[in-house]
Image (cartoon, helix red, strand yellow):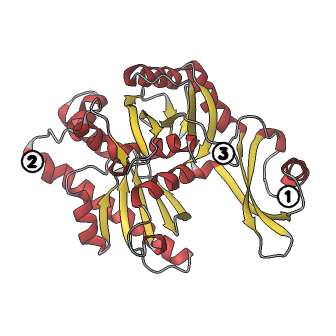
Amino acid sequence: MRISDLKTFGLGRKPSPMLGIDVGSTAVKLVELSQLSGEAARYQIERYAVEPLPPTAMSEKKIADVEAVGQGIARAVERSGAKSSRAAVAIAGSAVITKVIAMSSALSESEMEGQLQLDADQYIPFPLEEVNIDFDVLGPSASQGMVDVLLAASRRENVEDRVAALDVAGLKAEIVDVEAYAIENACALMLGSGAKGASEQVVAVADIGSMTTTLHVLHKGQVVYTREQKFGALQLINEIQQRLGMPRDEATAKVVANDLPGGYQTEIIGPFKEAVAQQIGRALQFFYSATSYNQADRIVLIGAAASLPKLDRLVEERLGIVSKVGNPFEQIAIPKNIPVAALNRDAPALVLAVGLALRGFI
């Protein structure tokens, strides 16, 4: 076990710009932001890219082929024209253990680190030499003279495989974050705090990825619940691929461009959208039964399948909750060299990468 110069989960670090790189099940997404001063928008997108990965590169959300993923990241860097060599990546919340611990407020950061190294085996059900950990002071505890400290830990291979893939691409890993925390950052930007009661709302963020759909529920801007389900856009892509007899990347391109024969909308796309609504509804029921909450105020759809035409409208009709497609770039300045139509099309799939890129500033 060690707490190294690499801030494993991005906790307690000083801001500095970096690339946000989302290593997904089927593609790498890269976003580079800059920070503005004296502008209505606080950030500007400088570059971005979406680069497909070979089918064997990932196994669920774990890297199966470090070299292939690294080469995919390198292609994304080249395609985007990104100049920075510093990057933030993320691992799935299911691969991370978190625990809030009360510690004496009189301890310095180095003393807390030493104490956590001694006590971590109480909270982590793995041999300590097999994990990476990080910690951050959250604020005063309920007990006088104590502070709440967030401890986060994950098996070392989850961290080291991503660091190694970035190294293949010639990049330096500054942060290995947790997906939920990065999405929390992006949602703070997307949802803002200006709307009346926005900070008090219960917001369900449905991340419809290639192989999984993950529900993150936020209250007061913080993730209070996460649930991952084995359902994703790859089911839709595979069916279209088989029917049209074409490679996966071509089938994906046709879905993204909404360039499918008319009958496919009724036979394939329609039932898939119904299944998305059912999966979100099921995840919400688990949320209600596991917590004291009994209603979400709105649903935000992100991920690979979120931009399917009128999906937000169907989800809203089926679940009776206001729904919209998440677009983090509504609050980010877009320079003339960025193709707006393509960016808006890709926006729901770039939310995690944006949240990671924001780690450079917050």
N-terminal of the pair, mark 1 or mark 2, is 1
Crowd around label 2: few <14 · some 14–19 · many ≥20 (10 Å): few
Q: Nearer the viewer, residue 36 or 51?
A: 36
Furthest residue to the front? 38
Identify the residue at horizontal 52%, vertical 42% (top origin).
356
Compared to residue 80, the image places residue 118 above or below, namely below
Compared to residue 144, the image places residue 35 above or below, namely above
Crowd around label 3: few <14 · some 14–19 · many ≥20 (10 Å): many
- Write down the quadrant of residue 1 in the picture: top right
Crowd around label 1: few <14 · some 14–19 · many ≥20 (10 Å): few
Q: Which of 299 and 235 is in front in this view?
A: 299
In front: label 1 or label 3: 3
Identify the residue at horizontal 57%, vertical 53% (top origin).
181
Residue type at mark 3?
Phe
Residue ID for mark 3: 9
Residue ID for mark 1: 122
- Write down the quadrant of residue 30 in the picture: top left
226 horizontally vs 47: left or right: right
Could you give the CA–CA distance between mark 2 and mark 3, rounded to whole angstroms?
A: 46 Å
Q: Which of 290 and 81 is in front in this view?
A: 81
Residue type at mark 2?
Gly
Compared to residue 10, the image places residue 280 above or below, namely below
N-terminal of the pair, mark 2 or mark 3, is 3
243 horizontally vs 185: left or right: left
Identify the residue at horizontal 9%, vertical 47% (top origin).
263
In the rendering, at what x and y percent does residue 49 appear?
38, 30
Residue ID for mark 2: 263
